[in-house]
Each structure stands twice: as C-alpha cells, then as structure tokens.
C-alpha cells in the first residue's frame, strides 16, 4: 500500500515538474481564404524558418497535415461550422472523420487541440445548440482512439459572448446564450479544456476612438485605467478584456477554466477611414503583445498566470469580404516576404521593413526624455517603461552606473532609450505620449552606456556586468530551485521503490 502511494506520488511529482517547464506560448493562425497562397509544403518551411512552434488551422486539410509531419510544430485544427450538424447528430460521423482525417497523420503531425465550431454566437440561427453535442461526440471518438489526454477539445468565441466587459470586474456572459454556455462550460471544466476567445483591441479602437486611446490599444499607454470595483490598474485593453472574461467565469463559479486567446492581432492596411491600420501599428501591437505574453506577467487579476496566444494571421488573405483591413492582417505577403519583421521569441530587437517609418538602426539615434515634459508625466512614463514596458531599469537604481545624476529627467531618458532600442527604434517607440525626443548625439556618460539598436541588453559600464530584471531573475531562481528539488525528490522515491522491490525479491 505504502509503495503504491510512493509510486503514485512520484509520478505526480514528475508530471508537476514537466508542467513547470512550460510557460506561455505564442502561435500564429494559418488562414487560407485566398487564391494566391504558397503550397502547404512551402508554408511549413516558412513556419520553421521563423521559429513558429504553434499553428492554428481552421479545418483538417490533408495537404496541410501532411506538410507539417515531423516538423515539431503543434497544430490546432478545426471542425468548421458547416460540419456541426452531422457531428452533433451521430458519434459515428465524428469517428469516421477522426479515422480518415486525423489518425493517418498523427502523431507524426503533432495535433494538440481540436476546435469544434468557431464564434457560433455570431452566426444567425440555432447553430449554437449544435456545438456541445458535437464536442461530446468528438471527445468520445478521441476516447475510443485513446487520445483524449493528448488532444483537447474546445470551441472558439468572439468577445460578443459577453454582455459586459467594462470595467473588467463587471464582466458577464450574455444571458441569451445561457442555454449553450452552461453545458459548454461544464464540458470544459470536466475535461480541463481552455475557454478559447478571439480578442481584437483594434476593433474597439476603430469603432470608439473617442473613448479608447490608440496607445492603450497598442500596449503603449503610460496612463492607467482603474477598475473602480477592485482597484486593479490596467495599462492596456488586452489585459482588461482577458480579465473581464475571467470575472465572467468566476461569476458562474467556473474558476478552474483557463483562458486561451485563439486570435488577436492588428491589420497593416485599411480603407481611408481606418487610419490606425498601418504597418507601424501592427508591428507595435504584436511586438508588445509577444513580450507581454512570454514574460508570464499575466493580467492584473491573474498575475503570473500563463496565457497562450495565437496571432492572426500568417498571410494576407485576398478573398476575405468586408473592409480593406479584413484582407491585411498577415505577417507575410503571399510571396512569403514579410509585411513587417517580427521576432516571435520576443527577445531581440526587431527591424521594420524599409518602407516603414523608421529611424536609423546604425547605432547613431537615441531617445531621451523631453525637458518640456512635466515631472508628473515623466514619472508616469518612467513607471510604465520599467513595468509593463519590460525595460531593465536596474542601472538607474542607487549605487548603479546610471543612478547619478539622481534626477527624474536623467532616469526617464535612460528608460526611454532602452525601450526605444528594444522595439525597433521606430518613431512610435520614442513617443511616450510626446514626452520622448529622438537625438543623434550619444547621451552616454562616464560608466553609464546607453543601449543602441540591436543590443540585447544594456551595458551599464565596460567593467560592470549588467543586472537582469528582478522579476526575471527571481523567476529563474525559483524555477531552478523548484525543478531541482522535485527532480531529487522524484529520484529518491524511485530509488526507495527499487530498494523495496529488491528486498521483496530476496525474501
């Protein structure tokens, strides 16, 4: 009995250890509503070339599944809305689909999620009532194949599934969807599947620019929006929308369901009235999104919680209807050239394309704080840069090379420049609401060296090792200590079990 408990405990520890090794992830949506896209084989090469590890497709196209075999890329595949009726009526339909469209290519092609339907509450009619029965039949088919633990089943939603999203703490589901949401949420909770949401701050800004600032939508706001009910501070719309969903789930007592963002992004081109749809804004949004996600900072209401996100989309899709922006969400043109360059790891500086509004990246342009800015505005911008902006501000702490002169203007200049260089040295990265100024004279002094374009970290001095950010350092130490402890514990238990088995044999 004791040995059985030890073995169970050891296995649980190992699974927990493996769980620690995974942080938030960033994937890309591979939509194919176009007539000029490269073949799936070429797309697979492009995806690997750009180190994209997670990909969402909207069906189970055989050519795509074949192309991604043995690439290591994890796929989220979809059951289209048009298939909901047959999938909901008979489990045999789901089993036949799994047998013919999935199993021949799995596990060479890594499939981790199946989305059953997409944004069904946006579709007129009674499509919603088909989703849960279809999900149940897909899950039953996976169980029959022994894959229910490896492939999770869910469905995607638009933010329209909420009746209220502001303030975040007042987030609530639309009661008209209750007949669909309650069994769907029960399914997700029972099977430990994520709630999948498509979030687009772009639309909120485009449709209500008088109430939503562009900086707030682009993760660039140096001001804060306060939730009056919780006192939580929000510096970007993305976090506010995510938390509104978590509060809505909590209100229905579904506290264990995690949220996954299956679509988000920003268009690079739009109609004349869509002035915010530009390559600069698209790059800014996605750069800041990626860095925000991979740092595992979480949201104000879910600090430190992992959040998986998929950027929409891989290519511009010329057959999509609607305004011009609808056809211009891609990271790449159909000829596989970049609309703008994007480092999906979030670690390096990102250069913009030649036709974008960029400053020189040859190390001769810097960003400093404006002498005309008020101390209140500078302090707010400095706090943002050293916080949500992910700038390493250790060099301006007491006893560090850039602490003196101990003035707000000097400290803000150092932080502004670091953010500016880390984000492609673009004009918008030096805006800070008009508090930043670009200069061509190096502001470095004594042992305080200002970052230049392409640098991965600030060299505070030639003989002083740069100090990594406190949060990152602490997280790494905690991770190393925890994993080492769990590994040692796990091995110790295994050795004890082995000794017990040998003793039994000798007896």
Image (cartoon, rainbow, N blue to C red):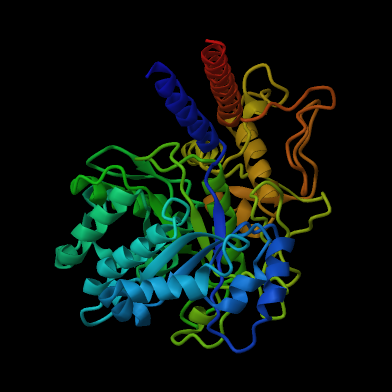
Quarter assignment of residue 333 = bottom right
Is the residue 84 above or below the residue 492 in the image? below
Q: Which of 401 and 506 is in front in this view?
A: 506
Query: From the image, which quarter does the N terminus lie in?
Result: top left
Q: Nearer the viewer, residue 58 or 99?
A: 99
| Residue 209 seen from this side | no
Residue 168: percent from left, percent from top: 28, 49
Residue 213: percent from left, percent from top: 42, 59
Q: Nearer the viewer, residue 45 or 389?
A: 45
| Residue 330 seen from this side | yes
Residue 263: percent from left, percent from top: 46, 64
Is the residue 110 above or below the residue 232 in the image? below
**Looking at the image, which residue is at 74% across and 42% down?**
456
**Looking at the image, which residue is at 62% across and 31% down?**
393
**Looking at the image, which residue is at 48% across and 30% down?**
11
Residue 351 shown left or right of residue 292 in the figure: right
Residue 1 shown left or right of residue 490 in the figure: left
**Looking at the image, which residue is at 53% across and 53% down?**
289
Residue 475: percent from left, percent from top: 56, 29
């Amino acid at each position: 009995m004791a040995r059985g408990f030890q073995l169970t405990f050891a296995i649980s520890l190992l699974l927990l250890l493996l769980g620690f090794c995974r942080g938030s992830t960033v994937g890309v949506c591979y939509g194919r509503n176009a007539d000029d896209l490269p073949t799936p084989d070429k797309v697979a090469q492009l995806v690997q070339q750009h180190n994209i590890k997670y990909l969402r497709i909207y069906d189970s196209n055989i050519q795509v599944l074949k192309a991604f075999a043995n690439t290591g890329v994890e796929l989220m595949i979809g059951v289209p809305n048009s298939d909901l009726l047959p999938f909901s009526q008979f489990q045999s339909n789901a089993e036949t689909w799994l047998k013919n469209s999935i199993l021949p290519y799995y596990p060479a092609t890594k499939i981790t999620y199946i989305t059953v339907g997409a944004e069904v509450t946006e579709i007129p009619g009674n499509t919603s009532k088909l989703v849960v029965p279809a999900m149940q039949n897909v899950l039953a088919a996976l169980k029959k194949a022994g894959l229910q633990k490896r492939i999770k089943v869910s469905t995607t939603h638009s933010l329209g599934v909420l009746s209220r999203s502001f303030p975040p703490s007042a987030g609530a589901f639309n009661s008209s969807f209750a007949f669909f949401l309650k069994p769907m949420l029960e399914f997700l909770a029972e099977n430990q599947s994520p709630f999948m949401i498509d979030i687009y701050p772009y639309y909120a800004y485009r449709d209500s620019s008088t109430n939503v600032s562009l900086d707030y939508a682009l993760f660039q706001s140096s001001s804060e929006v306060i939730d009056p009910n919780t006192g939580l501070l929000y510096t970007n719309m993305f976090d506010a929308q995510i938390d509104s969903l978590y509060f809505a789930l909590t209100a229905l007592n579904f506290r264990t369901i995690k949220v996954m963002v299956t679509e988000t992004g920003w268009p690079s081109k739009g109609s004349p009235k869509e002035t915010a749809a530009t390559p600069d804004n698209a790059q800014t949004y996605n750069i800041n999104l990626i860095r925000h996600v991979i740092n595992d900072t979480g949201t104000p209401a879910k600090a430190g919680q992992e959040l998986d996100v998929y950027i929409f989309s891989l290519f511009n899709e010329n057959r999509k209807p609607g305004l011009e922006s609808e056809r211009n969400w891609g990271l790449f043109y159909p000829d596989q050239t970049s609309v703008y360059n994007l480092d999906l790891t979030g670690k390096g500086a990102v250069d913009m394309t030649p036709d974008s509004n960029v400053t020189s990246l040859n190390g001769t342009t810097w960003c400093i704080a404006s002498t005309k800015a008020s101390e209140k505005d500078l302090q707010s911008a400095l706090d943002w840069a050293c916080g949500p902006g992910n700038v390493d501000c250790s060099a301006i702490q007491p006893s560090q090379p850039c602490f003196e002169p101990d003035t707000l203007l000097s400290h803000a200049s150092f932080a502004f420049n670091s953010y500016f260089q880390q984000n492609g040295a673009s004009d918008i990265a030096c805006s800070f609401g008009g508090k930043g100024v670009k200069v061509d004279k190096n502001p470095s002094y004594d042992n305080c060296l200002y970052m230049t374009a392409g640098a991965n970290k600030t060299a505070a001095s030639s003989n002083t090792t740069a100090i990594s950010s406190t949060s990152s350092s602490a997280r790494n130490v905690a991770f190393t200590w925890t994993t080492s402890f769990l590994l040692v514990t796990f091995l110790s238990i295994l050795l004890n079990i082995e000794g017990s088995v040998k003793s039994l044999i000798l007896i």
